[in-house]
Amino acid sequence: MPPKAKITKDMILRTVLDITRETGFETVNARSIAASLQCSTRPIFTCYENMDELKAGFLEYAYGYYEQYVANYADSVKDTPYLILPLSYIDFAREETHLFKLLFINDMDLNMSDAKDFYKEAGNEKKAALFSKAIGVGPEQAKVIYLDLFLYTHGMAVLTATNKLALSRTSAETMLKNFLSAFIKQENPDWNPAI
């Protein structure tokens, strides 16, 4: 008799990703994972102490999936660099609705009692610095514009993910270009986008 396949954390995380993408994270439980892996629930709790630990590991795994989505998007779409993040965010909301809701609505790790708290989240300072270089505006002005861009984009993406707004990629791109043009020209009246 051949030995049973060993269930690994990676197998569990990939299974949770598949279930979440298909039906949403709310349908993930030990039984649904075990059924998908065709095993008992025991291997799940050998790898993870409890479902809370599994969820924490999965959120990190799912965010890595999102980051890979953005990287693939940047490679496949020929857009100006400062439009890649907002457009990929909206497309992710449209194409990976359940994952978007989990990562950026239900379990978004962002606590903004004040707008400037946006820059307490890891990576946002770096993204704003890159944005500053891309648009040719000073770092402090770019941080203000980048935060406004995030809020505008997040609203569009949430409305898309909740089926309250049906935007084509072209419409979203036009709206973002108009938004950015207005805000950047306030800081740099000579700005002429190469769009």
Image (tube, rainbow, N blue to C red):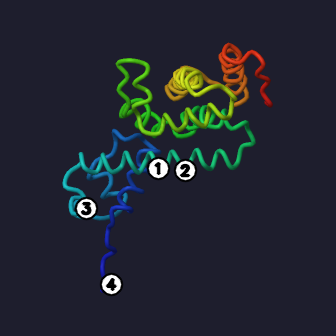
Assess disc 1: are there few (<14), some (14-19) or many (≥20) residues with their C-alpha within 10 Å of its C-alpha.
few
* 3D distance between C-alphas at marks 2 and 4: 36 Å
Is residue 88 shown left or right of residue 119? right
Kind of residue sitting beneath label 4: Pro
Name above or below for residue 39 compared with residue 85. Answer: below
Foreground of the two, 39 or 138: 138
Residue bearing the label numbered 1: 64
- Camera-near label (2 vs 3) is 2
At numbered mark 1, what does the secondary structure look like: helix, strand or loop?
helix
Residue bearing the label numbered 4: 2
Residue bearing the label numbered 2: 68
Q: Residue at x 68, y 19 (%)?
A: 184
Give the image location of residue 69, x and y in percent. 57, 47
Q: Residue at x 67, y 23 (%)?
A: 176
* 3D distance between C-alphas at marks 3 and 4: 22 Å
Q: Pointer 3 and pointer 4: residues touching (CB < 8 Å)? A: no
Residue bearing the label numbered 3: 47
Assess disc 4: are there few (<14), some (14-19) or many (≥20) residues with their C-alpha within 10 Å of its C-alpha.
few
Foreground of the two, 44 or 57: 57
